[in-house]
Amino acid sequence: MNKILIAYFSRADENYVDGQLKYLEKGNTQVVAEKIQSLTGGELFKIEAEKSYAKDYTTCVEQAHQDQVANVFPKLKQTLKDISQYDEIYLGYPNYWSTMPMAVFTFLTSMDTSGKLIHPFCTHEGSGFGQSLKDLEKLCPQARITSGLSLYGSKVAQSEKDIEQWVQSKGE
């Protein structure tokens, strides 16, 4: 049986949901990651920058944009230096400025993903994967990246069947 890692970046606090700002106890990507964990039995790993983004949405968006423009690879609270024990990686993130949050870039560049099967999943409010899949291919050229799952963050609670079907299909 394959050993599975579910690595994800997620942000709670104030978020943009259905055209308005709402406070979330748990980030949308975390909700999806936990559902994948319940379906696969994989190990969860939360990707977190040492310095968190602001709790209010507008400031967070500005900070994320500044990090991307400056190509900042933030230090992470914890790392996984060796992922050799994992055969498959479910990689989750919200769409930040048409790609992955920069903490996910840090995570991916800190290890060898050669030969790994990566199943990307993304939450968003209308922009889908943006260019994140192309960025993922550049960061992990020796990995096999499957068809990802893109979900509206505001609809994750109603997306259980989509998540189940995607996990069962292994992103194929």
Image (cartoon, grey):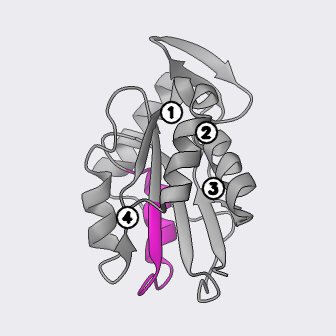
What's under tag 4, amino acid-wise?
A: Thr
- Left or right placement of residue 77 versus residue 19 in this view: right
Q: Badge 1 local density, few (<14 within 10 Å), some, or many (20+)?
A: some
Callout 2 environment at 10 Å: few (<14), some (14 to 19), or many (20+)? many
Residue ID at (62%, 43%): 32
Relative placement, left or right, of 108 versus 158 is: left
Q: What residue type is labelled 3?
A: Glu
Based on the picture, tell me whether residue 105 belongs to the magenta stretch: yes
Dot placed on the residue nearer the N-terminal end, 1 or 2: 2
Q: Where residue 101 sits: x, y (%)?
A: 44, 50
The residue beneath circle 2 is: 11
The amino acid pointed to by label 2 is Arg
Nearer to us of marks 3 and 4 is: 4
Q: Which of marks 1 and 2 is in front?
A: 2
Q: Give the range drawn in magenta.
A: 100-119
Taking depth in this image into account, of 166 and 68 the one nearest to the observer is 166
Q: Which of 130 and 161 is in front in this view?
A: 161
User: Where in the figure is residue 17, as x and y percent of width and height?
Assistant: 52, 18
Q: How many angstroms separate mark 4 from mark 1 (CA)?
A: 30 Å
Q: In this view, does 154 lie above or below 94?
A: above
121 in the magenta segment? no
The residue tagged 1 is 60
Of pointers 3 and 4, the one earlier in the residue sequence: 3
| Label 1 to label 3: alpha-carbon separation | 14 Å
Label 1 vs 3, first from the N-terminus: 3
Name the quadrant of the C terminus.
Answer: bottom left
Evaluate whether residue 70 shows in this view.
Answer: no
Regarding mark 1 in the picture, which secondary structure is present there? helix
Give the CA distance from mark 3 to mark 4: 24 Å
Rendered image: mark on residue 146: 4
Labelled pair 1, 2 in contact (Cβ < 8 Å): yes
